[in-house]
Image (cartoon, grey):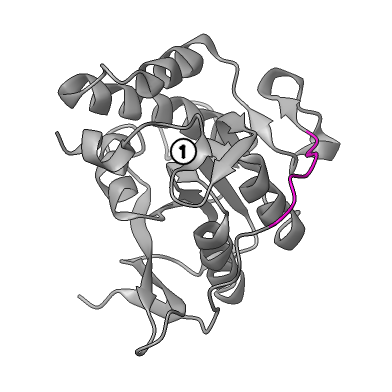
Amino acid sequence: MTPYTTTSDSSRTSSRESRPTVPVIRAAERPVSLVASPVVLEHPIAQHALTALRHRQTVGLDFRAHCHQLLLVLALEATRSMALQTKVPGAGQGEEAQVLAKPIVFLAASRAAMGIAACLREFLPETVFGSVTLDPAGSGSRLEPRLHVFHARSLSEVRVVLFQPIVASGLSATLALNLLRKSGANDVALLSYITSAQGLARIRTGFPEVPVFTAAIDQGWANQLGPLPGIWNFEERLCE
């Protein structure tokens, strides 16, 4: 099978930017008119899982379990607004029923995200899973995003859920979103455990229509460490 693959010529840009003030709304208070505003999940399970991920003594199976737990709550919130359509069942199957009007395509935006996303396969059995990879282009420092999806319908006909566990500068997220836009996606949501205020501002500047669902927005940011306080050694602990 050959994956649906698309590339873009987007280049690496500087991550230096001033700390912005970003309007934030809570999941329980989200009005329809502000659906694209950043949504911080205050669900008790989400905040409990995030606290466990931030704690340095959470390792191994416990760390991965809380990763799965938090992703599940994020996915539930990100699909809350999906439209339904009426389906007429076959003869003898009862009354009309409602089903999703669009299929879901779930894309992992990093290698760590690919492993975590496996927990959703049983929860969303009809979902198509894929990834967006960022690979060096040629011999320079430019990053080129590539989209990999098997058996997917046109991206203009689906809800695309993009998952990046931690959004730091926002560079990789914006490169992925730009590729999705060029590929025809017009209904996209971004999920992240934690995002920095700077990264969120970069996303909002380029993609104001994309709703961002996160468990926390961290105000501090460092070039090497990402959002502060963030999640300590995220990828290393994920593999322990």
Residue 22, picture quadrant? top right
Q: Quick one: quadrant of the C terminus? A: top left
As drawn, 217 above or below 144 = above
Where's residue 157, x and y in %? 56, 62
Examine the rendering and report whether any part of residue 23 can be seen. Answer: yes
Q: Is residue 21 magenta?
A: yes
Residue 135, picture quadrant? bottom left
From the viewer's side, name the closer residue of 98 and 212: 212
From the viewer's side, name the closer residue of 88 and 39: 39
Seen at 62% across and 49% down, the residue is 199
As drawn, 30 above or below 134 = above
Seen at 41% across and 26% down, the residue is 70
For mark 1, give the secondary structure: loop
Direction right: furthest residue: 33
Q: Main secondary structure of the magenta part?
A: loop
Residue occupied by mark 1: 89
Query: What is the span of residues highlighted in magenta in the rendered image?
Result: 17-23
Seen at 75% across and 40% down, the residue is 37
At label 1, the amino acid type is Pro
As drawn, 193 above or below 128 = above
Mark 1 residue crowding within 10 angstroms, few (<14) / some (14–19) / many (20+): few
